[in-house]
Amino acid sequence: MITSMEQLRRAFEKQGYIGEDEIIVTVFLALKLGKPLLIEGAPGVGKTEIAKVLANIHNTELIRLQCYEGLDENKALYEWNYQRQLIRIQVAREGQDGCSVEDDLFSDQYLLERPLLKAIRSDHVSVLLVDEIDKCDEEFEAFLFEVLSDFQVSIPELGTLKAKHIPIVVLTSNGERELSDGLKRRCAYLYINYPGTDKEIQIIKTKVPKVSERLAEELARAMYYLRHNVDLKKKPSIAETLDWARALLMMEADRLSPELIEQTLNLILKNKEDLDVFRDTCGANKLAAVSKHA
Amino acid sequence: MSESINKLENIFEHHLVRFFHILRQMGVRVSSAEAIDALNGLLLTDLMDRAMVKTALRATLCKDQEAQRIFGQAFDSYFVPWDEKRLRLQEFQKQKEEQEALLEQAEAELVFAGPEEAGGDSGAWEIKVDLTDEQKDTYTKLPEEEKQKIRDFLKHHQAGNQIVDPNDLMSSVVRSQLNFWKRKLAQLEEEKAERKKQRLLQPRYTGEDELDEVLEHIVENIIGDESILHEDMRNIADKDLPRVSLVIHKLAKKLATRISRRYRQSQKRQKVDLRRTIRHNIRFGGTMLNLKYKTKKIDRPKLLLICDVSGSMARYAAFVLQFIYGLSSAAQSIESFVFAEDVERVTPYFGGPINFEQTMTRVMNESQVWGKGTNLGESLKRLWHRHPGVFTGDTVVIIVSDAKTVAIEKAEFYLAKMAGKVKDILWLNTLPKQEWNSLMQVRRLMRYCRMHECYTLAHLEKVMRLLSLT
């Protein structure tokens, strides 16, 4: 049970999540106020990771609802197991079972729980991650907004089901579209930016502990430069920094050299256009040089 | 003791409520529920820790990046040491008094003499020109010789003229002159900062000095935080074009996906495909164990882009071309036309493998209409008759123009015709919204389309947001 911000910060650090003060304060408020936490930010800055960390901290399961265009209630809430119901009807018709078929057909054993219902019916506080909510349609967002308001759903055959324990809800968005005011009003809001150099050095050292201090610093500076000074279509994320660090570690590198950058460039820049822009406007020599200076 | 604690709580709440009020005046939507969340959130934080208080308020009150940007400045402007606040207030009141004095002086100077008989025994009497504060403000900013010209006009046309309603006539002449100067001043470089201030943030002033001073302070400081998003597109330097290009490409991509998503929704219904279901379930003795569905074929909307490249839009040429280029590379089915006195199809220039600079050079060199006068009516007429196939029920028309055109009746006629045939017409107007009312063309054309102010990338982004909500 988290009772203070300091405790939450330590718990995050224990899970290997190096968060800015802003992240800790906002997550703490969302937990204490019982509000869903809406996290926005560029891909790969650690939005989803917060939900995973929260599940670990609370020693509970993470229920994930991945949003996409066309996602509807059937896939998010519940569905009746149609095939199983049919077989039940067939069996009853052949007279092998005398009990009332109709009552049976809409019981729990024929119900297929989807993430939202699973979170509502959970016997303990769970963490519900609604990932990339900006990818779903507006009508599904409105439905979700209703569920998150009351934490109860109505299933015509079973009646109204109310959450036994209000789940910890984390919604993430890449900002592909604007979310409705109603939904935003109900959430605590957190925008995560790319980390500063110092924070990224800390992250590298936590996640890839075998990397030398010097290499971690150079990697963080190089990434900072790429994100802020090169017009890339897709800026490298923290996950890509870590991949890069691991790769360089495997190559037994201790410093960032132009040759190493050229050899491993594909780990951080993942489309041709960005590679061209990098080579035209920056280049491995320059990147290696800027990574040496604080 | 408890009384003083209560008093302290009251002061605290009073300040917070005023702060919420300021945010609302700045356009941040703060609902009562969010205000309560903010108060509850503060109870969980260390009130002596400024950074923590700021984060707690931001997390509960501001739900997007723009709101957070305004919030940051509002917080820094409002929660300041008492001495600083008092000094700022005094400065604000001093400036306000000076401004009022200038307006009074303008009012005193802009008078003309009425007919003698109306003045009775005392002879001629003075009539004040009926002006708004904004018009008086424009007068105060004029060079002295221009002021003198207006005063001379008033003096020259005073008593003795047989005018039926002198007040109306004289006032309207002066008003027209001042409106002309307002527009002209806005174009001058020294007015650039002023214009930016007007368009970026337009807080609703409260009339209460203490709050208005904070609002003014926020506006002043947010201007310093200019980014390319808020720069007027006609002022963007060549060196910034690659960045603009990237932003426009992203925005255009968003627009293309959003429009297609909106249409896709309406046709999302799935139906059971009986033929395939029966065929598939024969193996189960006819029991429908596995249902097969059929979905309607999704037609992506067609985009029809009509861009003004006349003389009045020349300074926005790069913006217009960037927009076409970005949209052409993001959307598949797009037809592009440019117009001035006539209309030209430019679709073949875009969407190919050549880069933006080459495309821009080709279009500008080969176009016959570039930089000519604007005749929207004739252009729409020719477009309607020469390319009837581009107007279909699933076409979304996007017009980029300042709407300054001749032959307004014809333009209205064909725009109305188009509105009846296509799915939607979006008009991105490069004129500031506050100038729309003074332009008859804008007032008339906006009846047939959804018109949005659009001369910065921030505006373009706002249009995208609006589109996603409708």
Image (cartoon, helix red, strand yellow):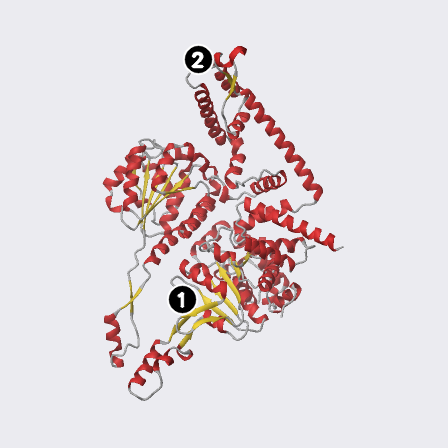
Total of numbered circles in the picture? 2
Q: Is residue B213 left or right of residue A271?
A: right
Q: Nearer the viewer, residue B55 or B5?
A: B5
Q: Which label was assigned to residue A73?
A: 1
Which residue shows up at 42% across the image and 32% down it?
A: B438
Relative depth, front residue between A34 and A191: A34
Residue A278 locus on image (x, y percent): 48, 53
Q: Which chain does tag 1 point to?
A: A
Rendered location of residue B115, percent (x, y)? 47, 13
Q: Which residue occupies the extreme bottom position in the image?
A: A96
Label 2, on which residue? B161
Q: Which secondary structure, mark 2? A: loop
| Residue at x 51%, y 56% (from the top left corner) | A185
From the top left corner, tell me how far across and down residue B128 is, in percent.
52, 21
Residue A204 falls in image quadrant: bottom right
Q: Nearer the viewer, residue B110 or B403?
A: B110
Question: Which type of secondary structure does the marked residue at label 1 adopt?
Answer: helix
Task: Give coordinates of residue B23: x percent, y percent.
Answer: 57, 47
**Left or right side of B419 for A250:** right
Assess disc 2: are there few (<14), some (14-19) or many (≥20) residues with their C-alpha within 10 Å of its C-alpha: few
